[in-house]
Image: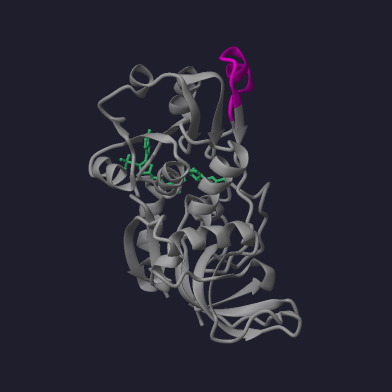
């Protein structure tokens, strides 16, 4: 099979011919229809995540996938060959940027029926992280106000929609073409972060979702109400600053969770959650797509069709 592999940290990803992997009893072999990229894939390639997700080389990149079950292990009795599924494999295992991937059977979720399997590859990490942050950590309530930074990004584009569905008022930051995109996703107020200072335009926010870090995060503590909550996905929050502003600040460490992903699929099939697709490329274009993901300028999800 074809697979996008690296042979060491910081090595250029290369498409290579490799053997189709053998499954264990509780695993399933999925024929991959599409994979979506995440900034994590780039961080994995650079070796930045070695302390959290050590890998062995050669390493096949990719965690988020959609596809069709090819073969099931003897104990993976819940699934049948031909089932259409989505999943996120553990980053330490990787393997999704390939024609076939091994997935533990309890990681699999039935794919949405209302969208293409290719688009469904865009769901797992982006929507999963937004859901974990807003619903499981912030326990977002109707009437609350949420500031979503990077609203046109992979996490932010889902967070806007989930927050709106929860009955919250949504403020989103974006720039350029992203401004219209976040409006269409449901943001009530849009801030052009390149030309406006969000800290001067927003106050008394209940929840900030920060997928940026740095100066954006530093300025975000001050826009929260007393007792408000900052949730950071890119860099750990500053406990001292949080204390000084009387707010809570927590790092979101996204964990794969099939039951959460199933709730996300349900939302998609109800028409309440859409996938903002930045671009779709074939596996041959994955190296270039990888560079685009690394630029930090993606508008929504980059999908690689396998
Ligand atoms: N901790 C976890 O478990 C976890 C889970 C998921 C993601 N993450 C991390 O969260 C971060 C975001 O992930 P993602 O998938 O959303 O990334 P992404 O899709 O690459 O985000 C790109 C978007 O960020 C916007 N952006 C960049 N700088 C901005 C700024 N200063 N203000 C507002 N928007 C800005 C860009 O808009 P412009 O092009 O208009 O600048 C672009 O649309 C990454 O660092 C990722 O690794 C962590």
User: Which region of the structure is painted magenta?
Assistant: 237-248
Residue found farthest to the top: 244
Ligand 1 image position (quadrant): top left
Specify the quadrant of the image occupied by residue 197: top left
Q: Is 40 displayed left or right of 258 in the figure? A: left
Residue 90 visible, this orientation: no
Q: Is 111 displayed left or right of 273 in the figure? A: right
Q: Is residue 67 above or below residue 126?
A: below
Residue at image location 56% in from the left, 55% down from the top? 9
- Residue in the foreground of this view, choosing between 141 and 281: 141
According to the image, what is the colour scheme of the structure? one colour
Viewport quadrant of the C terminus:
bottom left
Q: Position of residue 152 (x, y in %)?
A: 35, 45
Residue at image location 52% in from the left, 39% down from the top? 234
Q: Position of residue 291 (x, y in %)?
A: 38, 55
The answer to if 245 sits in the magenta stretch is yes
Specify the quadrant of the image occupied by residue 168: top left
Q: Is residue 22 above or below residue 96?
A: below
Q: Is residue 303 above or below residue 15?
A: above
Residue at image location 59% in from the left, 12% down from the top? 244
Residue 236 visible, this orientation: yes
């Amino acid at each position: 099979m074809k697979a996008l592999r690296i042979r060491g940290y910081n090595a250029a990803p290369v498409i290579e011919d490799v053997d189709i992997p053998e499954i264990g009893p509780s695993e399933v072999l999925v024929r991959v229809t599409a994979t979506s990229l995440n900034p994590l894939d780039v961080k994995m390639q650079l070796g930045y995540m070695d302390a959290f997700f050590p890998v062995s080389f050669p390493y096949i990149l990719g965690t988020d996938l959609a596809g069709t079950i090819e073969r099931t292990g003897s104990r993976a009795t819940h699934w049948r060959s031909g089932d259409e599924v989505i999943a996120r494999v553990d980053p330490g295992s990787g393997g999704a940027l390939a024609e076939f991937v091994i997935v533990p059977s309890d990681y699999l979720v039935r794919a949405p029926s209302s969208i293409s399997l290719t688009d469904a590859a865009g769901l797992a990490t982006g929507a999963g992280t937004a859901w974990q942050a807003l619903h499981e950590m912030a326990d977002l309530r109707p009437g609350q106000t949420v500031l979503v930074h990077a609203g046109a990004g992979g996490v932010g584009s889902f967070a806007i929609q989930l927050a709106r569905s929860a009955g919250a008022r949504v403020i989103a930051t974006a720039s350029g073409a992203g401004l219209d995109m976040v409006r269409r996703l449901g943001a009530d107020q849009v801030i052009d972060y390149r030309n406006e200072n969000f800290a001067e335009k927003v106050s008394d926010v209940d929840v900030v979702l920060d997928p940026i870090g740095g100066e954006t995060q530093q300025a975000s503590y001050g826009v929260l109400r007393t007792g408000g909550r900052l949730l950071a996905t890119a860099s750990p929050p500053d406990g001292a600053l949080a204390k000084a502003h009387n707010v809570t600040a927590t790092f979101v460490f996204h964990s794969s969770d099939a039951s959460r992903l199933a709730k996300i699929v349900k939302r998609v099939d109800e028409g309440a959650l859409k996938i903002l697709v930045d671009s779709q490329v074939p596996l041959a274009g994955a190296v270039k797509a990888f560079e685009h993901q690394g630029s930090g300028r993606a508008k929504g999800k980059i999908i690689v069709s396998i």
